[in-house]
Image (spheres, helix red, strand yellow):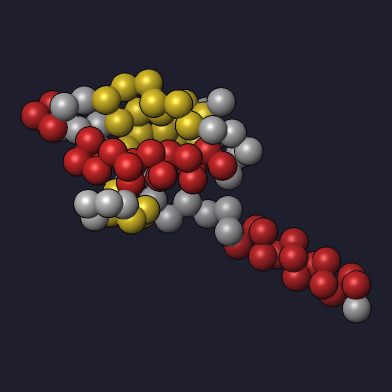
């Protein structure tokens, strides 16, 4: 019985590691988060910085790291937010 419970917990952890790329925030949702264990990019993230922050932190948390923003473009420049996972 303990082995089954342990296996269920392990599988549940694996199911939660996928990055959906959608995080709700104060002004809507941030979509299209892309990246890897080193960092990523959030297109148009400048439109909802709190949601972009949550999306970046969620992405990096998969790798037991925290997100650090390294680039923020204005809305007129496309609104891209880039981040590193450290």
Residue sitting at x 89%, y 70%: 3
From this viewpoint, which residue is outermost toward the front? 26
Q: Which residue is at the front of the view, 17 or 57? A: 57
Query: Percent from the top left, x then y, of residue 75?
Result: 13, 32
Q: Quadrant location of the C terminus? A: top right
The answer to whether any part of residue 71 appears in the image is yes
From this viewpoint, which residue is outermost toward the left? 76
Query: Percent from the top left, x then y, of residue 59?
Result: 49, 43
Numbered marks: total = 0
The answer to whether any part of residue 31 appears in the image is no
Q: Quadrant location of the N terminus? A: bottom right
Query: Percent from the top left, x then y, of residue 42?
Result: 32, 38
Residue sitting at x 47%, y 40%: 57
9 w.r.t. 86: above or below: below
User: In the shown orientation, is residue 26 left or right of residue 39?
Assistant: left
From this viewpoint, which residue is outermost toward the top? 70
35 w.r.t. 83: above or below: below
User: In the shown orientation, is residue 7 left or right of residue 2?
Assistant: left
Residue sitting at x 43%, y 39%: 56
Query: Percent from the top left, x then y, of residue 62?
Result: 58, 44
Specify the quadrant of the image occupied by residue 15.
bottom right
User: In the shown orientation, is residue 16 left or right of residue 82?
Assistant: right
Specify the quadrant of the image occupied by residue 83.
top left
Residue sitting at x 47%, y 51%: 19
21 w.r.t. 61: above or below: below
User: In the shown orientation, is residue 76 left or right of residue 52?
Assistant: left
Q: Which residue is at the front of the view, 82 or 54? A: 54
């Amino acid at each position: 019985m303990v082995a089954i419970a342990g296996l269920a917990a392990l599988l549940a952890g694996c199911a939660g590691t996928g990055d959906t790329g959608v995080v709700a925030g104060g002004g809507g949702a941030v979509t299209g988060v892309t990246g890897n264990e080193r960092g990523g990019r959030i297109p148009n993230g400048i439109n909802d910085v709190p949601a972009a922050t949550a999306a970046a932190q969620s992405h990096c948390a998969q790798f037991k790291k925290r997100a650090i923003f390294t680039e923020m473009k204005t809305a007129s420049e496309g609104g891209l937010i880039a981040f590193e996972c450290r």
